[in-house]
Amino acid sequence: MQEVVILHYFQDLKLKEVADIIGIGLPLVKYRIGKAKELLSVYLGDKKMMMTVDEKLHAYAKIRRIEI
């Protein structure tokens, strides 16, 4: 899941490009992106609910020390 998030949000690749690079189907890429958003929302809690998904992903990257 982390690979999909990094490629899509931090490398600015389209979902189809991510699917091709990883070698999985587009529906699975979409599922993993959705699951990552869901997990991140739960992880950041209610006080962060007003953030956009992109802001949440960047916050998560900082917490996990993922290079953008």
Image (cartoon, helix red, strand yellow):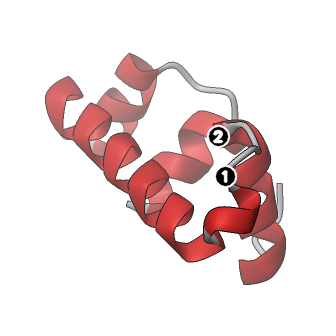
Q: Is residue 59 above or below residue 4?
A: below
Q: Residues within 10 Å of mark 1 (few under 14, many from 20)?
A: few
Q: Which of the 4 image quadrants contains residue 33? A: top left
Q: Is residue 64 above or below residue 51?
A: below
Picture coordinates of residue 53, whole percent (x, y): 64, 40
Image quarter hosting the N terminus: bottom left
Left or right of residue 49: residue 51: right
Tag 1 secondary structure: loop
| Amino acid beneath label 2 | Val
Q: Residue at x 16, y 28 (%)?
A: 27
Q: Is residue 52 visible?
A: yes
Looking at the rendered image, the disc whose residue lies closer to the viewer, 2 or 1, is 1
What is the tally of numbered marks visible in this picture? 2
| Amino acid beneath label 1 | Met
Picture coordinates of residue 9, whole percent (x, y): 65, 38
Question: Nearest the camera: 22 or 9?
Answer: 9
Q: Residue at x 49, y 68 (%)?
A: 42
Q: Which of the 4 image quadrants contains residue 34? A: top left
Picture coordinates of residue 61, whole percent (x, y): 75, 66
Disc 2 to disc 1, C-alpha distance: 9 Å
The residue carrying mark 2 is: 53
The residue carrying mark 1 is: 49
Q: Is residue 25 visible?
A: no
Among all residues in the image, which is located at the extreme front?
46
Tag 2 secondary structure: helix
Image quarter hosting the C terminus: bottom right
Question: Nearest the camera: 37 or 61?
Answer: 37
Among all residues in the image, which is located at the extreme bottom?
64
Q: Residues within 10 Å of mark 2 (few under 14, many from 20)?
A: some
Q: Is residue 26 above or below residue 2?
A: above
Picture coordinates of residue 6, whole percent (x, y): 60, 51
Q: Residue at x 29, y 32 (%)?
A: 30
